[in-house]
Image (cartoon, rainbow, N blue to C red):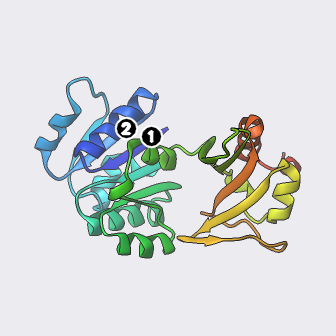
Amino acid sequence: MHVVIMGCGRVGSALAHSLEEAGHSVAVIDRDATAFRRLGPEFAGQQVTGVGFDRDTLIEAGTERAIAFAAVSSGDNSNILAARVARESFGVENVVARIYDPKRAEVYQKLGIPTVRTVRWTVDQMLRRLSPGGAETEWRDPTGQVVLAEVHVDISWVGQRITAMEAASGVRVALLSRMGDALLPHKDTVFQQDDLLHVTVQADRLADVSKLFAAAPMEDR
């Protein structure tokens, strides 16, 4: 897939190399051309000098065909503006913005833009938002037999009742993260776009559950 990264600091350059090593095509945007030195001569992706929320710059970087967009510059306002333009104007499905101010992060999360706060940032977390798939274990019981995990859910599950998702997978949905808030599902709760699904499951079943939710529901196949 093609990924666009705005910001070529330590975070942006690390993401670029990680994504390229995973076999993806990458374009990096930065207003300072000298920042691209962090990428090194081995980087084979695009290097686009410009403002990350400028339409022409985004087109040059291939945002129209991008599957994911990461805004990781040093400015909160620039990051969230670029992320919103990528999602709303270019229709990029997987978008994430790096935010320094935790209060702003909460507001933007409620607007539907996934954010990663600098104080708990890691390259792995960014990669998870850009390349959703599989599951991320969030808690494991002392015996190692039961886990709480965030599971990527294919967009085709949107509109399904949580009770139906539990029945199809054999897991217990512990909670949903919706627009920055935690939601305990009830019998009438419906899975919505941009919801994050957190499930409790036997550890040895997690891979199978991840595979099930990464595909369309059986009735849609």
Q: Is residue 49 left or right of residue 201?
A: left
The spot of residue 30 in percent (x, y) is 21, 50
Residue at the spot 29% in from the left edge and 45% down from the top edge:
11
Residue 67 visible in image:
no
Residue beneath label 2, please?
Answer: 26
Specify few, some or many for label 1: CA neighbours under 10 Å numbering under 14, 14-19, or 20 or more. Answer: many
Disc 1, disc 2: CB below 8 Å? yes
Which residue position holds label 1? Answer: 2
Most extreme residue toward the top, as rendered? 42
Q: Secondary structure at mark 2?
A: strand
Residue type at mark 1: give it: His
Residues 173 and 156: in front is: 173
- Disc marking residue 52: none
Give the quadrant of residue 104. bottom left
Is residue 164 shown left or right of residue 191? right
Q: Residue at x 39, y 33 (%)?
A: 18
Q: Is residue 88 above or below residue 124?
A: below
Task: Say whether residue 204 is left or right of residue 6.
Answer: right
Which residue is painted at 32% across and 60% down in the image? 55
The three-letter amino acid code for the residue at tag 2 is Val
